[in-house]
Image (cartoon, helix red, strand yellow):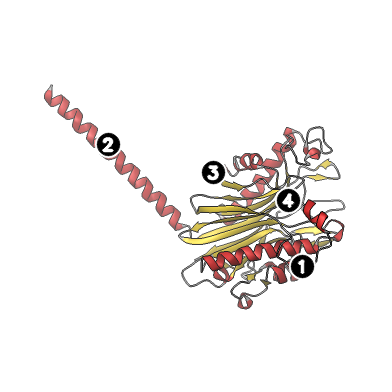
Amino acid sequence: MVGTEYSILIMKRLYIIFIALVVVMAAAVSCKAQKAQKAHIIGFYNLENLFDTYHDEGKNDYEYLPDGANKWTEAKYDRKLHNMATVIRAMRDENKVSHTVLGVSEVENRHVLEDLVSQKEIADANFQIVHYDGPDRRGVDCALLYRPDQFKLIESKSIPFTFDDTDIKFEMNRDEQRNFRTRDVLMVRGTIDGEMFAFFVAHLPSRLGNKGEDLRSRGAEIIQRNAQSLMDEYPGIKIVVMGDMNDDPTDASMTRYLRGKEKISEVGQYDFFSPFISMLKAGYGSLAYQGGWNIFDIIMVNKSLAAAPKGTFQIQPIVKKKYYGRIFHQPFMTEKEGKYKGQPLRTMSNGVFKDGFSDHYPTFILISK
């Protein structure tokens, strides 16, 4: 009996040792796999009215309810989620890797983001969510999706739109300014492979009635000042600004107030390299607006990422080995006929469900060492 008990004890110890070795080897393989990814996709996508079918108190979301103008049912919502995930998956298929970071706009709440990242097309990316409920009257916000195996979150904050401490002359009077509500700017800071990054995700005020240039300039100024503060506090930090700016990269909000430059050689300490300036001039577009093509879906990077030291992450050319930005569109995302032929195939058009995607094409950049 003693010999039998001793044998059992030895077997238990060997089993424990075996399990420990398996765990250690699995961890080593996982670590190696994570370190092996030297290229990272960073993108932005305006999801065009990603609303659920329930009313959020205090928000003007009534057109996206079952009895609202768009007759927004669970079936339509499910198709919208599937379609958004299909585009994100198509970008992954092209790049052979999921986004490390994906900024999004026009999302109603955290619930719709949780539903999105759980879609079967992208669930295995294990996207985590950074989102704050903002003051926009329609109830749409910006958010950030990220892969926790590649991006290590340190902090985030929601930056409000204010009219303070600026020399910009506004069309609105003081009462109108106090009642004005728009999307907050999202800031997320963390590390990728040990290097510190900060991401700003924005959806600047709209162009309805061809107005709001002063408001977009103010939004850009707010982003630039917050980015500059981070650059002062964390020398060498790599910053990416992305969003639906409702302006082209050549407009004053982007060039004067956000200090976007067309060429890397022009980028100073607090400036940003704006790769979509040259792409706009070459005829590229991320959306069609009033009969012409624009690039409102802009991504910029600071000098630390545009002209990075050797051996660290740097933005890379990805289109014709010339352009540093990519506007992603495929035939399935595009209108095939009619008045809007060749333009992004959107979800709703004049109250009709089109079973489409978004009125914006997504954009992304590539960084690698």
Q: Residues within 10 Å of mark 2 (few under 14, many from 20)?
A: few
Mark 1 lies on residue: 168
Indicate the secondary structure of the residue bearing disc 3: helix
The label nearer to you, 4 versus 1, is: 1
Q: CA distance from mark 1 to mark 2?
A: 68 Å
- The tag earlier along the polypeptide, 3 or 2, is 2
- The tag earlier along the polypeptide, 1 or 2, is 2
- The tag earlier along the polypeptide, 4 or 1, is 1
Q: CA distance from mark 4 to mark 1?
A: 39 Å
Mark 2 lies on residue: 16
- The tag earlier along the polypeptide, 3 or 1, is 3
Mark 4 lies on residue: 333
The label nearer to you, 1 versus 2, is: 1
Q: Residues within 10 Å of mark 1 (few under 14, many from 20)?
A: few
Mark 3 lies on residue: 124
Disc 2 residue type (three-letter): Ile
Indicate the secondary structure of the residue bearing disc 1: loop
Compared with 268, 139 (above or below) is above
The label nearer to you, 4 versus 3, is: 3
Residue 235 visible somewhere in the drawing: yes
Q: Look at the image and tell me in which quarter the N terminus lies.
A: top left
The label nearer to you, 2 versus 4, is: 2
Q: CA distance from mark 3 to mark 2?
A: 30 Å
Indicate the secondary structure of the residue bearing disc 4: helix
Question: For this view, does 152 lie left or right of residue 94?
Answer: left
- The tag earlier along the polypeptide, 2 or 4, is 2
